[in-house]
Amino acid sequence: MAASDLVISPVSGKADLKAFVDLQWDIYKDDPAWVPQLKDEIYGLLTPGKNPFHEHAEHQYFLARRGSEVMGRISAHYDKQALSMPPEQGMGPGTGNFGLFEAKDGETAAALIKTAEDWLRAQGMTHVLGPISLSIWEEPGLLVKGHDHPPTVMMGHNRPEYQAWIEAAGYEPVKTLNTYELDITQDFPPLIQRIVQSGEKNPRINIRKVDKSKFDREAAIILSILNDAWGNNWGFVPITDSEVAFTGKKLKPIVFEDLIRIAELDGEPVAFMMTLPDLNEPLKGMNGSLFPFNWAKLLWWLQRPKCRTMRVPLMGVVKKLQASRMASQLAFMMIEYIRRASVEKYGATRGEIGWILEDNQGMVAIADAIDSRINKSYVIYRKGL
């Protein structure tokens, strides 16, 4: 077919939405590093009324077809919460996004990106950050390093070709987000061990497990620390109460008390570290569905998870302690306690921390101090409209 036969149209109705979701199974069918996510979860993220992100965002999904073949997809969206943030933090007035981007060839990629830009321009947006799918808290950035091994839970994966296609459309890198991996079967360097031991002797410090029977209370404590700790970070957008409830419900099955720690100083919660067993390991062979028997396999795994990798998606220390020795000490203590539990109880051998902003000096210093190394890099691009 000729190039002019490429047709891009807004997603309309259940058949189009199914084609939008199913495209990944076509594009990545021969990619051993891709992990199919549960389709019910994907539909939940995309659907207003299910994902509370849509309560403060506007979106349009698009499909590209050549004849009857689906060639690509993209979302154009903007988060009203992000529009009210300070521009120096990356978001701010006029910030639109594209995301959920997939394409089979460069021509399709260019046409989809232009379509998303046109929609955003019509909505009054003045620049684009992307890919962000859909929220900065979900899957931000394009994978540019680490295509050769599977992503961990809640991290994205894409074809290597996408980088050149996005840059050819006039986008420039604005921020790199890295994940760090380490061998958690090995003790940390002696200096880190001494810092942990010193903290254990300090009566002001208490590192405790979360109490899953008081899930809502613990979630509120973590959210309070997170909003304070991350409030000045690049890309930060506040999380709403309904988003906390939505994410909490989704994560509750893989929340284990000894893998999430809250640090208290003089009885006050001042830091937290959240660790999740890598759900992608059991999902890898399920092809996106729990039926007919995968639900039983997953339920069995959730009751007694054994996994190779533990991921630390979130960690934070309140602003008043940041850049202090105490902040580092609390971080190392939480990391060490969770490392021990991960190895002894869950059989894990590998940890992954991140994402971490490339210029977050405090977190990069912690990652370096425990002998971790960058294993994946994701780039967020920017373009003026």
Image (cartoon, grey):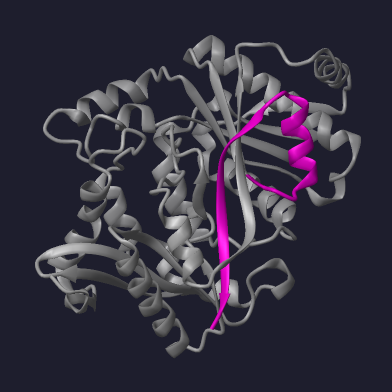
Which quadrant would residue 100 be assigned to in this image?
bottom left
| Percent of width and height locating residue 43 | 27, 56
Q: In this view, does 323 lie to the left or right of 351?
A: right
Q: Which residue is drawn at 78% across and 27% down?
A: 369
Q: Is residue 255 left or right of residue 234?
A: left
Q: Can residue 4 be seen in this view?
A: yes
Q: Which residue is drawn at 47% across and 71% down?
A: 169
| Percent of width and height locating residue 140 | 51, 55
Q: Is residue 363 magenta?
A: yes
Q: Does the magenta stretch include residue 368?
A: yes
Q: Nearer the viewer, residue 355 or 374?
A: 374
Q: Which of 166 and 365 is in front in this view?
A: 166
Magenta segment range? 356-385
Q: Residue at x 50, y 17 (%)?
A: 348
In the rendered image, the vertical position of residue 192 relative to residue 11, given as above or below: above
In the rendered image, the vertical position of residue 50 relative to residue 67, given as above or below: above
In the rendered image, the vertical position of residue 292 relative to residue 28, given as above or below: above
Q: In this view, does 355 lie to the left or right of 305?
A: right
Q: How many labels does the image show?
A: 0
Q: Nearer the viewer, residue 359 or 310?
A: 359
